[in-house]
Image (spheres, rainbow, N blue to C red):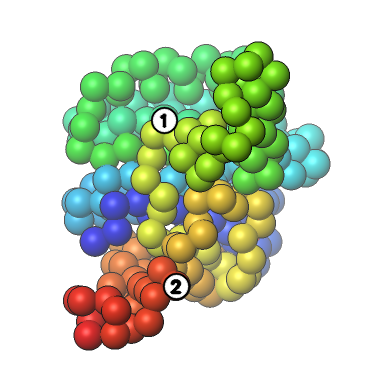
Amino acid sequence: MPRHVAIIMDGNGRWALQKGHLRSLGHAHGVDAVRAVTEAAAEVGVEYLTLYAFSTENWRRPQEEINALMELLVHTIKSETDTLMKNGIKLEAIGNLEQLPESCNNQLMETVHATRNNNRMTLILALSYSGRWDIIEATRKIAREVKSGNLNPEDIDEDVLNNALNTARYPNPELLIRTSGEQRISNFLLWEIAYAEMHFTPVLWPDFTKDDFYTALLDYQNRERRFGLTGAQIPSIS
Ligand code: FPP
């Protein structure tokens, strides 16, 4: 079982347009899929689930859609807090959270605080997030350490960079899922997915079910993970 699964939830807009609705309705139905997958992940023992809910680039969408998404986030985080508590799920967030509208950030912080002692699974929302943004922020932090004389440039290694990222306290995802048939990373967790297995499915996010999640897990379990070694060097498969 992967400890950490990351998901690019894609296809909400197309789902809605195909049905003759506004794109925002796709996001609203996307929440049902978020609920189903969170439940499935906790049930099978995944420890960390990271969802790409809003990217740095998403700020360039029409203002109306941004407003609808932010309202949906506030509403969903608020209304799901009880369920998170009942199911022992801790909510956390990564990204440039200061860019979020105040109401959104406040609700997020409230639920993050309320769920902080839950320990069955951690649900991480990537909000106003991009991999390059995080790497730049981490580089700034490291540069400041060097400038202040606390860090020698020769001592900068993978651990130093890992620890400077928003994702420092999580293991790297072993499995990355993207829905809607697109086969791109779109600036998500660029550093962290170095060895992740990719699962692409044509299913649009609002249609993504628990069974689709199990299919992705089975796909992952059938992969040979070699980390640069030969198959013969991996004891479990040789
Ligand atoms: C991508 O579909 C999806 C998003 C940009 C937003 C995802 C947000 C949700 C599912 C609701 C958030 C809820 C919580 C609580 C996490 P798209 O709009 O890019 O679809 P398209 O590619 O078909 O246009």
Q: Residue at x 60, y 37 (%)?
A: 154
Q: Position of residue 30 (x, y in %)?
A: 50, 50
Q: Which mark is residue 3?
A: none
Name the image quarter holding residue 62: top right
Left of 61 or right of it: where is 30?
Answer: left
Q: Position of residue 21 (x, y in %)?
A: 66, 55
From this viewpoint, is residue 100 visible? no
- Foreground: 110 or 225? 225
Q: Residues within 10 Å of mark 2 (few under 14, many from 20)?
A: few
Which residue is denoted by mark 1 in the rendering? Answer: 92
Discs 2, 1 touching: Cβ within 8 Å: no
Residue type beneath disc 1 = Glu
Q: Could you say which quadrant of the image residue 5 lies in?
A: bottom left
Along the line of sight, which residue is nearer the eye, 226 or 217? 226
Residue 214 x %, y %: 29, 67
| Element type at mark 2 | loop
Q: Earlier in the sequence, mark 2 or mark 1?
A: 1
| Secondary structure beneath label 1 | strand
- Taking the image as shown, residue 105 lies to the left or right of residue 58, namely left
Q: CA distance from mark 2 to mark 1?
A: 32 Å
Residue 228's mark? 2
Q: Is residue 21 above or below residue 108?
A: below
**Which residue is drawn at the image coordinates 41% and 53% (left, top)?**
173
Quick one: 139 or 53, which is closer to the camera?
139
